[in-house]
Image (spheres, grey):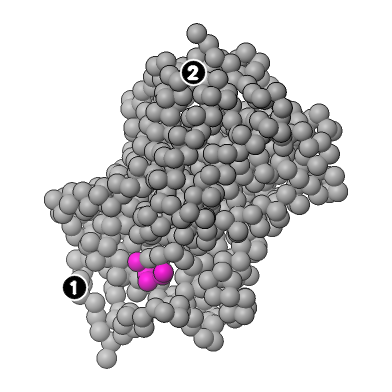
Amino acid sequence: MKWTQVIDPLNNIALSVLIAAVPILFIFWALIIKKMKGYQASLIAIVIATLIAILVYGMPVKLAVISIGHGALYGIFPICWLVTMSVFLFNLTVKSGQFEIIKHFMASITSDRRLQALLIAFSFGSFLEGTAGFGAPVAITAAMLVGLGFNPLYASGICLIANTAPVAFGSIGIPITVASQVSGIPELPISQMVGRTLPLLSILLPFYLVTIISGFKKAQEVLPAVLVSGISFAFLQWFSSNYLGPSLPDVIAGLGSIVCLMVFLRFWKPKVVWRFANEPAPTVNTNIRYTNGQMLRAWSPFMVLTIMVIAWGMQPIKDVLNSIGMFQFEVPGLHNAIQDKEGVLLPKLFKVNYLSAAGTAILIADLIAIPLIGLTYREGAQVFAATVNQLKFPILTIAAVLGFAYIVNDSGITLTLAAVLANTGFLFPFFAPVLGWLGVFITGSDTSANALFSKLQYATAASIGVDPVVTVAANVSGGVVGKMISPQSIAVAAAAGDLVGKESELFRFTVKHSFIMLSVICVITLAQAYAVKWIIPVYEMLNSTKIVATPDASRGYVYLLGLAILLVALASTIVVMTKKKPQTPNLVS
């Protein structure tokens, strides 16, 4: 038996929207007003959404239950798999004592908290978003900032806000690839359009972050460094997205801004080093000098991580790994059991790409890093057990959040909210980013939001005479500022920042910034649609009959061999350099 989604179950769109908005409004109320723990709010939201889906939308009970289970399963793999491996990597560096050397290195560049936030949360986080995505950047950078002595709330909140600029090009450009597949617009023009919107945000974001941390006056004290960070990032993001495509903007812009800021700080320092008012005095002994071998060893987990996630993002390697280490199955009772209003059956498949998943790449990096940083595998196993225990409530929260996302999508609740925004006529370009924002808030993923709404964005824009690439790109750009308040992202950041049970504080920290940035993107999109049409790229639609080339497995094996050689060379270099000199730091008299 097939069940058909309905968009207006009450035959009154205003009433239907009010009902559809209840579960989402509950999450805002629960986290902002009631200050509930994340997993409690998510579980109650599931109950509310399920009741509405069954009683108002007429969704069969069996389909509703299976839909929630499908989402929870996706939350566990690949999302929790990735988060666990990321936090495990960080915990290994702490257990081995190597993070103390990293802290010293960061302090040697600058002990100013404002500039450390730019280097780690903004630039390094962008690089990680471009390679791994799906929660890894916030998990790793928030943990690093907490390790450096940042207030956990500030560390997690700043990393969530900093993660806005790169999300559109995350995971080697997957969000834009999905937007292209769903809308029929080629990847490059979408990449170009997003690359002509987000750099405006990228220029402002570093100053915005520093202002949040230290206030407007203190932010002005580091304005030169802020400008170097923001302008270098924005320029490289614009250039790579417009001329190289959607795969590398985050990697190039992230690395480029790190290098530019580090070089700049060799010649310029703020007059006053700023630290949090209530934090203890610096504990880094500036008389200590670490050898190059010690520095290389300390950073080796993150170097291996970087190499692995870049390799895992290469299509030939993905093809090989998926050919030998992936299976998928139709979700029993749910696959092709739901049809949309056009009568199209919705496939419900669960893909277990256990080799090509980003979390697996990070696991391999973990296993390689353990002996490099001086731990035994027995000690590594103990750290892993402690990490799983640390993340037990975040794992529950993430599974619940994804269960909620799937039930509101499968029942048609999300489509009801989208239909209202699509009926705003001339003003639709202004509201187009809101649709992306809503999709990411619900699903926690810009990729998922683009899969949900890109076709709707295309059709609505075409019907009102606006170039569809403007609104499809707006779905991508609007989604990035919804990421910081998505319950899934909040749960990940809370886990990394040791804020489990305090998700409501983190949500309240970020929510106003999400609305401010969303408003900016809405205005930019409206201007692009009507006032500055010259900014829109010229393109041709994809040919739906184009031939898809069969993957060449031999290339993937060659790439894997090259990866193995590179990792062996790196490990050998680290072993040789750390044996040359004693592993105790040298004191300068």
Q: Find numbered disc 2 in the image and state the secondary structure of the residue it sits on.
A: loop
| Mark 1 surroundings within 10 Å by alpha-carbon count, few (fewer than 14), some (14 through 19), many (20 or more) | few
Which of these two is toward me, 141 or 537? 141
On whether residue 164 falls in the magenta region, the answer is no
Up the image or down, 433 lies above or below 516; here it is above
Residue 137 lies, with reference to residue 16, above or below; the image says: below
Residue that appears at 61% across and 62% down: 205
Say what amino acid the circle numbered 2 marks.
Pro
Numbered disc 1: secondary structure: loop
Q: In the image, 581: left or right of 126? A: left
Q: Which residue is mark 2?
A: 60
Residue 24 makes an appearance in the image: yes
Picture quadrant where residue 216 is located? bottom right
**Which numbered tag is attached to residue 302?**
none
* Image x and y of residue 222, in percent: 58, 77
Nearer the observer, 374 or 64: 64
Q: Magenta region's main secondary structure?
A: loop
Instruction: Tell which of 298 and 330 is nearer to you.
Output: 330
Q: Residue at x 53, y 50 (%)?
A: 29
Q: Is residue 556 above or below residue 587?
A: above
Image quadrant of residue 57? top right
Residue at 84% of width from left, 49% of height from top? 532
Type of residue at label 1? Answer: Pro
**Which stretch appears magenta?**
147-151
Q: Indicate the position of residue 353 as horizontal and vertical percent values.
A: 37, 30
Q: Nearer the viewer, residue 71 or 208?
A: 71
In the rendered view, tell whether residue 567 sits above or below residue 280: above
Residue 85 placed where, x, y %?
32, 47
Of the image marks 1 and 2, the number of the one nearer the N terminus: 2
Residue linked to disc 1: 582
Q: Is residue 330 visible?
A: no
